[in-house]
Image: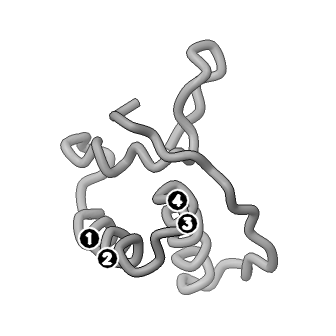
Amino acid sequence: FSWDKAADKGGANGSVQFEMDRKELAGLEEALKCLKKCKKIVDDISFADLVVLGGALAVQKLGGPQVSALLIGREDAKEAD
């Protein structure tokens, strides 16, 4: 989930689906399964956008602010960052 300006890669690009072996992603397997199911149903949104939407909803569910606008149009990564 981190942007590397020097390498011009990373950020919210959906690469998490290829990186589940990383220790900092431990415990997110169920969330990833849910997002993959959503992607099968709504194919015209990128996986990257689904990850951002899921994060915004998680913050709200945990008592954080509601996201009133979410820009979509992110491109999906083809491999791990």
Quadrant for residue 70, please give it. Answer: bottom right
Q: Tell me, for residue 37, which label it has, or none.
A: 2
Q: CA distance from mark 4 to mark 3?
A: 4 Å
Q: Amino acid at mark 1?
A: Lys
Percent coordinates x, y for residue 32 in the rendering: 31, 65
Q: Are discs 4 and 3 less than 8 Å apart at CB? A: yes
* Mark pair 3, 1: CA separation: 16 Å
Quadrant in the picture for residue 80: top left
Secondary structure under the numbered disc 3 in the rendered image: loop
Q: Amino acid at mark 3?
A: Ile
Alpha carbon separation for disc pair 1 and 4 = 15 Å
**Residue on which the image places disc 1:** 33
Which of 75 and 28 lies nearest the eye of the viewer? 75
Residue neighbourhood size for the residue with mark 4, other residues' Cα within 10 Å, grouped as few (<14), some (14–19), many (≥20):
some
Marks 2 and 3, how far apart at CA: 12 Å
Secondary structure under tag 2 reads: helix
Instruction: Check disc 4 and give the amino acid type.
Output: Ser
* Residue found farthest to the top: 6
Q: Image point 32% across, 51% down: which residue? A: 17
Q: Which residue is mark 3?
A: 45
Q: Which mark is residue 55?
A: none
